[in-house]
Amino acid sequence: MSGIIRNKLFISALNKIATSATQMLTSQAPRSMWYLCKSHNQKDFTFASNHMLKPIKLYSVQSKSSEHTKAEKELIEFLAEEIVAEKKAQKLKTIPTELDGFKVSLDGANVTLEKKLDKETITITFNINHTVDTDTDPELDPTDDKPDIGEMKSKPNFNIDIVRGNRTLGFSCSFNNELGASGADDNYNDCFGIDEVTVYKGVHNEQVYSVAGEVIDGYLYDLLMNYLEEKGISNEFAEKLIELSTSYEHSAYISLLEGLVKFTSEK
């Protein structure tokens, strides 16, 4: 065989290897690779076994291979591998039942945090659906053995209700994309901001007036942020809220994958 032919065959083989590596990086573990990038500090949480995730139940493809289509078998095989990878990448194996004095309650995609004081009750609520930060898609280099693909985080909008008797002071809040993106004073690096403020009696309805945080007086805005901080809802607490939401969203994603396996496997 001539040297030219050998070179062409060698270049062709390298191209195939590069293509295969690129496909693996972009399709095999799109979420689990994100979660492997950074570990979370777990010391601020109180754990309980009643929120322990269910063990993985893998379904055999061979046992019902004759009953499944090619697409179904490929889907089941991929999901089995993906579940193992996602479980391995989990930062928290249990979801905390308490966060800085707030009792944590889970109901599907809804999360409620509640703290009772002498004359008032503070309730924080949010939903984890569509909260994962995927604003930018990582650029993967197929020649890089350890590509830097950042980290996925769940940053939900959340509501704060401070109830005294039959009156409620309500806040609608959201996490800032950039530090210092909200508030009147750019010197403060708040990781969340007030989107809306309302005060009402009894049950909230559409007739209750509310004002957008961006149009209220700047000094009043800062005072309200200080007020929330005194209630325990500080920047540090908000960071822990992100960790809680991220962990719970990740566990919900794994449960969804397990549900897909069960749905596809059963005939």
Image (cartoon, rainbow, N blue to C red):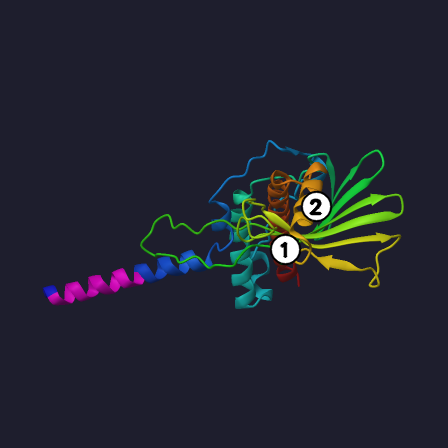
The answer for how far apart the CA atoms under marks 1 and 2 are is 39 Å
Q: Is residue 36 left or right of residue 94?
A: left
Q: Is residue 88 left or right of residue 206?
A: left
| Number of numbered discs visible in the structure rendering | 2
**Magenta stretch, overall SS:** helix
- Tell me the amino acid under the disc marked 2: Leu
The secondary structure type at the circle numbered 2 is helix
Q: Position of residue 230 (x, y in %)?
A: 70, 37
* Between 2 and 52, the one nearer to me in the picture: 52
Residue at 65 percent across and 46 percent down: it is 222
Q: Position of residue 82 (x, y in %)?
A: 52, 52
**Within the image, what quadrant is residue 162 found in?**
top right
The residue that label 2 is drawn on is 224
Residue at 22 percent across and 63 percent down: it is 11
**Magenta residues (range):** 4-16
Q: Is residue 66 left or right of residue 127?
A: left
Q: Is residue 57 visible?
A: no
* Between 12 and 202, the one nearer to me in the picture: 202
The secondary structure type at the circle numbered 1 is helix
Residue at 81 percent across and 41 percent down: it is 121
Q: Is residue 151 left or right of residue 1?
A: right
Query: Dot 2: within a 10 Å radius of its alpha carbon, few (fewer than 14), some, or many (20 or more) residues?
Result: some
Of the numbered discs in the image, which one, if any, rests on residue 94?
A: none
The residue that label 1 is drawn on is 256
- Tell me the amino acid under the disc marked 1: Leu
Can you say which quadrant of the picture contains the N terminus?
bottom left
